Image (cartoon, grey):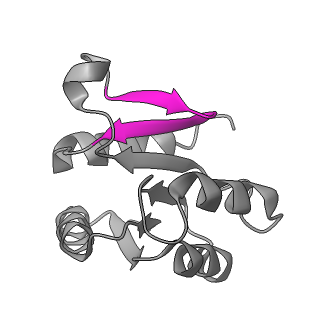
Amino acid sequence: MIEKKKILLIDDEENFCFFVRHNLEQAGEFEVITANRGEEGISLAGEQKPDLILLDIVMPKMMGEDVAAALTNDPKTKNIPLVFLTAQVRQEEIGVELTKEIGGHLFIAKPVNTEKLSNFIRAILAPEKIR
């Protein structure tokens, strides 16, 4: 039986979280937990120790950059790969690449299809990847 990778999705759009969780879990490789507020995401990251965090940039009360800073400054969560998943930049603006970097973190432009997102997660979490 394959060990599912735990993904934490922090995004204030509840419908987006529902569909991403549903679609990623359909693949059978991922367990997705969600948070709709930055503070909640920080807490869940410390408790759940996900394999990867997908983080929206624009959220009420606590922006994604602030959440990322809190996560990278916490010894419990600083080594968890963090990827911004944002509508701030469209795929057309970054070209054929799936990802770019913001503040040292990769980002993926919304909307993203499930197959590309799944492949990206697999690549980030590949055992041979050195972090």
Residue 16, given in percent of the width and then of the height, sits at 21, 66
Front residue of this view, candidates 38 and 49: 38
Residue 91, given in percent of the width and then of the height, sits at 23, 29
Magenta stretch, residue numbers:
98-109
Residue appearing at x 71%, y 64% in the figure: 77
Query: In this rendering, does residue 123 appear at all?
Result: yes
Residue 59, given in percent of the width and then of the height, sits at 42, 64
Q: Say left or right for 69 vs 121.
A: right
- Name the residue furthest right: 75
Residue 78, given in percent of the width and then of the height, sits at 74, 56
Which image quarter is the N terminus in? Answer: bottom left
Residue appearing at x 46%, y 76% in the figure: 37
Q: Say left or right for 15 vs 75.
A: left
Q: Is residue 106 magenta?
A: yes
Answer above or below: position of 96 versus 91: above
Front residue of this view, candidates 64 and 54: 64
Front residue of this view, candidates 62 and 113: 62
Majority SS type along the magenta span = strand
Q: Is residue 114 magenta?
A: no
